[in-house]
Image (tube, coloured by chain):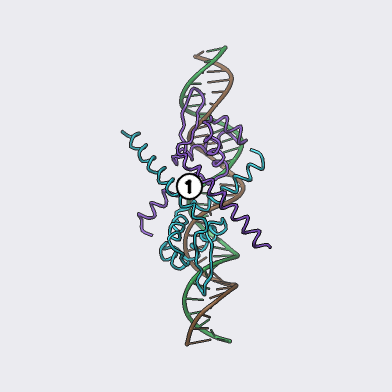
Chain colours: A purple, B cyan, C brown, D green
Amino acid sequence: MDAKTQTKYQARAKVIKALAHPTRLFIVDEISKEERCVCELTALIGADMSTVSKHLSILKDAGIVADEKRGVLVYYRLRVPCVLNLFGCIEGVLKANAAAHVAATK
Amino acid sequence: MDAKTQTKYQARAKVIKALAHPTRLFIVDEISKEERCVCELTALIGADMSTVSKHLSILKDAGIVADEKRGVLVYYRLRVPCVLNLFGCIEGVLKANAAAHVAATK
DNA sequence: GAAATTCTTGGCTATAATGCCAAATAGCCA
DNA sequence: TGGCTATTTGGCATTATAGCCAAGAATTTC
């Protein structure tokens, strides 16, 4: 793999890596419906606010979410809705896995 | 987040995590065209064969690829083509990031 | 302007991921 | 059988990630 190819896949991997965490997937799902401030997300997730803030900064750095400060609150929204399409595909993988497991243990 | 919700997002994250590596993205792209044996992939990637084999087992464990042994060779193929749709979305994110960067530094 | 609230960042520890080497396994062929 | 090739697995060192606490920054309100 030459350097250029590697750079290309590294850039892609960075975006996907930003999605590769349960909490961050939850955040994406949640703010896809409606924008949310950090305090709301923190309450929903049930972790330390600093932890949630760091997850948000990873998503923001990858370009997946955008933030806007209004007063004391910072609202996050989904910047690229197409990532939601991924969820359907992933569910398909999980279903296929479950079916394969049943078949293998029959 | 209750336990059930957490389990759901953990399962999704496992699949996405399997994709979240440059080498594994390359593998997915490569075998989407045509099945490949480990030795072919190793040559294309340029890493140790044991490293490539471990990447493949992560993809297989997540249900993204399937393998078939024919003689001494083990061929891998893409099991869920819909993950390819993801690539288009990711490229869109990267392009939006590049555009935003230009706008921010103007 | 002081206090309160929201959010981010730094620092730390614990855990997980990566990639190499070496050894084990499996199938082919002489 | 014995050796050869392809692949997987175990072990280990290095690096990256996660999440908490505490401290800092920004903004509103009293």
Q: Is residue D14 left or right of residue B12?
A: left
- In the rendered image, residue A44, in percent from the top left (x then y), is placed at 61, 34
Question: Residue B64, relative to residue A29: is it above or below?
Answer: below
Q: Secondary structure at mark 1?
A: helix
- In the rendered image, residue C22, in percent from the top left (x then y), is placed at 53, 70
Q: Quadrant of the N terminus of chain A?
A: bottom left
Q: Residue at x 45, y 54 (%)?
A: B22
Q: Quadrant of the C terminus of chain A?
A: bottom right
Task: Pinpoint the chain carrying mark 1.
Answer: A
Q: Residues within 10 Å of mark 1 (few under 14, many from 20)?
A: many
- In the rendered image, residue A46, in percent from the top left (x then y), is placed at 62, 35
Task: Give the quarter of the image for residue A39.
Answer: top right
Front residue of C26/D18: it is C26
Residue beneath label 1, please?
A: A16
The outermost residue toward the right is A106
Q: Residue at x 54, y 31 (%)?
A: A38
Front residue of B26/A48: it is B26
Front residue of A45/B77: it is B77
Front residue of A103/D24: it is A103
Q: Residue at x 38, y 40 (%)?
A: B96
Question: Residue A84, relative to residue D3: is it above or below?
Answer: above
**So how many labels did they put on this image?**
1
Amino acid found under the numbered disc labelled 1: Ile
- In the rendered image, residue A4, in percent from the top left (x then y), is placed at 35, 54
